[in-house]
Amino acid sequence: MSKSENDRQAHWQSVYRDRPAGEVSWYQAEPTLSLSLINETDIPLDARILDVGGGASILVDRLLAHGFGNIQVLDIAARALAVSQQRLGDLADQVRWHTSDITQFQSDQQFELWHDRAVFHFLTRSAQRQAYCKVLEQSLRPGGHLIIGTFAVDGPKRCSGLDIVQYDASALLEVLGSQFVLQEQRRECHLTPAGKAQNFAWFRLRRLTD
């Protein structure tokens, strides 16, 4: 892991060391929009799912409750994953957990669904985005579904003390390339635990089969 990757990991580890998971700005009591978009894909319950940056998110709980049985959660911060593992108790054994920077992730299998809420927009350098796309191309099967939530063009410009990149559909597709087709986009006004409004843009895409 490079120095910059170590720095990113240290940053997010410190976030979950210094603040309860329910107080960070991106906390959601219910991942309603994510679940709605996942439902639109109509994937089977045995589909392989990767939740990128899923850390302390309750999405994994809801997916398990819905009957999905092949879930993997990735986060750069082991402390964030530990929050979910402790919350799930014995159910955590039904999930594969990865402590990794997504730009360095190597999977031994391909996924039917890749879900990313608020990771991609932290990749402010072109090389980081290219590395993310390379991992995505290796990990998401042809015909697979991609769901990404980022800050919208009228959303915040920084989060957790870090710069971000705002996206609309054209900007996202320019990065992802022609092998992805946009199927749906939505907007979300996320209210932080402190009551601050943050505008998100959500995109549901599908990878072409050839």
Image (cartoon, grey):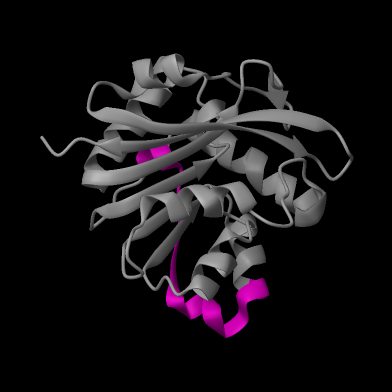
In the drawing, does residue 67 fall left or right of residue 187?
Answer: left
Q: Over which residues does the magenta segment extend?
A: 86-104
Secondary structure character of the magenta stretch overall: helix
Between 11 and 58, the one lying in front of the other is 58
Q: Is residue 20 visible in this depiction of the protein? A: no
Name the residue rendered at 36%, 36% in the picture: 205
Q: Quadrant of residue 165?
A: top right
Q: Is residue 10 above or below residue 77?
A: above
Q: How many marks?
A: 0
Say which quadrant the N terminus sits in. top left
Name the residue rendered at 31%, 63% in the picture: 47
Between 125 and 118, the one lying in front of the other is 118
Say which quadrant the C terminus sits in. top left
Q: Position of residue 158 (x, y in %)?
A: 70, 22
Name of the residue lying farthest toward the right: 194
Q: Is residue 113 visible in this depiction of the protein? A: yes
